[in-house]
Image (cartoon, rainbow, N blue to C red):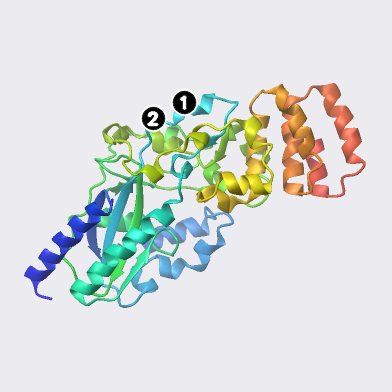
Amino acid sequence: MIEAKKIKLVKELRQRAQKLGFDSFGITCATTNPKLATRLDKALKAGWHGDMHWMQETALRRTSPKGLWADVKSIVLLGVNYAPKENPLPLLQQKSVGNISVYARNRDYHDIIKGRLKELASLLARKANADVKVFVDTAPVMEKPLAQSAGIGWQGKHSVIVSREFGSWLFLGAIFCDVELPTSEPAKEICGSCTKCLTICPTNAFPAPFQLDATKCLAYYNNEHKGQIPLKYRAPMGNRIYGCDDCLAICPWNKFAKTTSEIKLQAREELAAPKLMDLITLDDKAFRKLFSGSPIKRLGHARFIRNVLIAIGNSNERQLLSEIEKRLVDENPLIRGMAIWAYIQLANEEEIVSKKAQYMKKEIDKEVAKEWVR
């Protein structure tokens, strides 16, 4: 394609992206910053990825778009604003409700964005006679550095993309293509001396600015971790039952963000501040129904109830003891173990001694039994 036609195509793509509901648009080339491989290698060697073994397994492909697809020449980056109506931080003080990360309070963003990406990619394929591939956070693509190269925003000190227009509230999607397109001006990092996102973290998960140790991150533990959440992170978890928005929500650039116009990304009323009393009673069927179409459904019932029990243990709500007791005999050891911890947080010494004597006699899972003697 001659340059004039490419410029015209980019303009058409930008206009179509806006009509499809994308809030940000940019293009970068497929060659990446060589420092990315060094940074990723450092993080993996330090073990900051925890038990997200797929990061180690896909490291070579992750460091360069060409490692994923040798023919890629240009990458179109798209952003979708998901800013909430209100700052989510005050919800952390409402101990009787569960705090769900802003991005998960309605439909799964993967489902919303991918269809639109495919439509835009089809336009690109037709107009440029190109082969295309679309990705939404489900492949070894380092979307955030690419987004910075494409001018969408810059990676803040919390490692997440920050935008002048949308703060820290952007979902990202990418279209890879095998034709060269005019590139956008890269975004410059302008966090300045601000360190609010680092200092607000309740578990000090940032070894240094722009670095994240997932093994100290609450969102990692209540989203990705499959076992019992380590004891030292249970109290800091507070009422966070899915994700953690602290470092995002505190960002000063959020003052420029407008509430998302995408209805499917606005919080469903029943997920904005669900009562722990209602959540702890959910069986598997009710759980799947409540979170149908939500990313929370991928957790599975057992891990979700594990998270709810931690929130209950931190709630000071003694009236929830009866519901905890029901979970002490749950068939899933993940739930039983966390029910013990929650019970110990809310019960008095006499109640704890009585329950321990009762349940230690029949508990055959050693890991679960350990919870009584911590």
Which numbered circle lies on residue 321?
none
Determine the CA span between mark 2 and mark 1.
9 Å
Which numbered circle lies on residue 90?
1
Badge 1 marks a residue whose secondary structure is: helix
In the figure, 194 relative to 348: above or below? below
Residue located farthest toward the left when viewing the structure as drawn: 4
- Residue 75 placement (x, y as % from top left): 27, 65
| Quarter that holds the C terminus | top right
- Residue 80 placement (x, y as % from top left): 32, 49
The quadrant in which residue 62 appears is bottom left
Residue wearing tag 2: 86
Residue at image x 92%, y 41%?
361
Q: Nearer the viewer, residue 293 or 174?
A: 293
In the figure, 269 relative to 66: above or below? above
- Residue 166 placement (x, y as % from top left): 29, 41
Residue at image x 81%, y 37%?
372
Residue at image x 77%, y 43%?
336
| Quarter that holds the N terminus | bottom left
Pointers 2 and 1 in contact (C-beta within 8 Å): yes
Foreground: disc 2 or disc 1: 2
Residue at image x 23%, y 50%?
187
Left/right of residue 211 with respect to residue 187 in the rendered view: right
Question: What crowding class fits label 1: few (fewer than 14 Cα within 10 Å), some (14-19), or many (20 or more)?
Answer: few
Amino acid bearing label 1: Pro
